[in-house]
Image: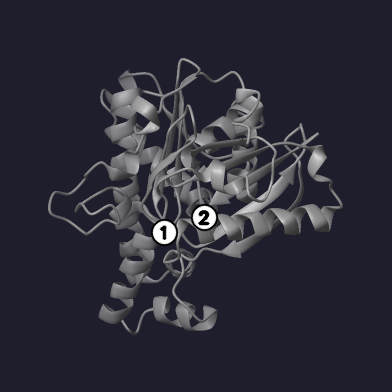
Amino acid sequence: MYYIGIDVGGTAIKGGIVDENGVVIIKDSVTTDAGQSSDDNVRDIAALVKKLLTASGTDENQIAALGMGVPGTVDPDDYRIFYTCNILFRDYDFVKEFGKYYSFPVCIGNDADCAVIGEAVFGKMKGVKNAVIVTLGTGVGTGTLVNGTLVSGFRGAGGEGGHTVIRMGGEKCGCGRRGCWEAYASATALIRDTKRAIEKHPESLLRKFAEKEGKVSGRTAFDAYEAGDAAAKRLISRYVRYVGEGLVNIGNYIRPEIIFIGGGISNAGDFFIRKLQSYVTRYSYGGRRNPYIKVMKATLGNDAGIIGAAALPVLKGAGRKIR
């Protein structure tokens, strides 16, 4: 039997067919349309599923369940999506609407929760009982295991570390508040700050790398940093502090054994992880006197969202059946 993993992101909806060992058999994606209706989002996801089944030659009866991670709040009992801030799902019964297209069971969870489940089921986190994964992408997601149990709060509405404030009255966040960690540590925030740095320092390599790529991306600042650009060095130094502050807050509250860094920004390079490790070790409560918190790149790589979503029904044993 196989599982389908769907990773709903702010810029793309990624999907894949995953076997019982966590191996992605086939994958594909569609562009996220943040402005369209919830029903249209389900239509796009169903079309992506059909594309995966057709391309792989997999029959619908071979699918044990579909797991889906969304950037928002999901009821852990009936999988109703209460809220997502970067795509339109509001108190929405996805399972019922999806049942118009397919009949296999469905599990839905917060995308960062799925990521930490994926590491626990298929990754190198087996045996680790206290861990947090932080995904740095369009937003900032956090998934938390405490004593081997997923912590997601009342009706799945907790665990939103990206929406803790690190600067009162600061940058506007997609959730409506100001100063959220996500508004400073996400790839979206880094792109915003890179554009500002280019405007301020048009002579910098930041502009040259952006022109070469044809756009400003999450990689622009890191590429210019590695090339020795002074403006990029200041930008990345500030970004490390923004990310680091949130990690220290998590460390002080949860004190996990490991903090995994996932999402697109995790591919920035080993030096980025080393800088975050140094920041967390230096500023965590008690410093080196308290138990060491290891900071490392998430192990499931670019397919973490797909594998984590597929791991959700594996962990739960089944999903909510279509009625």
Under mark 1, the amino acid is Ala
Q: Residues within 10 Å of mark 2 (few under 14, many from 20)?
A: some
> Is label 2 in a helix, a strand or a loop?
helix
Query: Which residue in the structure is indicated by mark 2?
Result: 264
From the viewer's perspective, is residue 222 above or below residue 315? Answer: below
Point out residue 273 in the picture as x, y percentages from the top left corner.
Answer: 47, 45
From the viewer's perspective, is residue 179 above or below residue 157? Answer: below
Does the residue at mark 1 contact the one at mark 2 (Cβ under 8 Å)? yes
Quarter of the N terminus within the rendering: top right
> Is label 1 in a helix, a strand or a loop?
helix
Question: How many badges with numbers are in the image?
Answer: 2
Residue appearing at x 39%, y 48% in the figure: 140
From the viewer's perspective, is residue 20 above or below residue 214? Answer: above
Residue appearing at x 52%, y 45% in the figure: 94
Kindly indicate the quadrant of the structure image that contains residue 312.
top right
The tag on residue 45 is: none
Kindly indicate the quadrant of the structure image that contains residue 14.
bottom right
Point out residue 266 in the picture as x, y percentages from the top left corner.
Answer: 51, 50
Under mark 2, the amino acid is Gly
Query: Which residue in the structure is indicated by mark 1?
Result: 187
Q: Of label 1 and label 2, which has the lower sequence position?
A: 1
Specify whether 4 is left or right of 170.
right
Query: Please, which residue is most extreme toward the right here?
Result: 57
Residue appearing at x 45%, y 54% in the figure: 137
From the viewer's perspective, is residue 12 above or below residue 74? Answer: below
Specify whether 94 is left or right of 17.
left
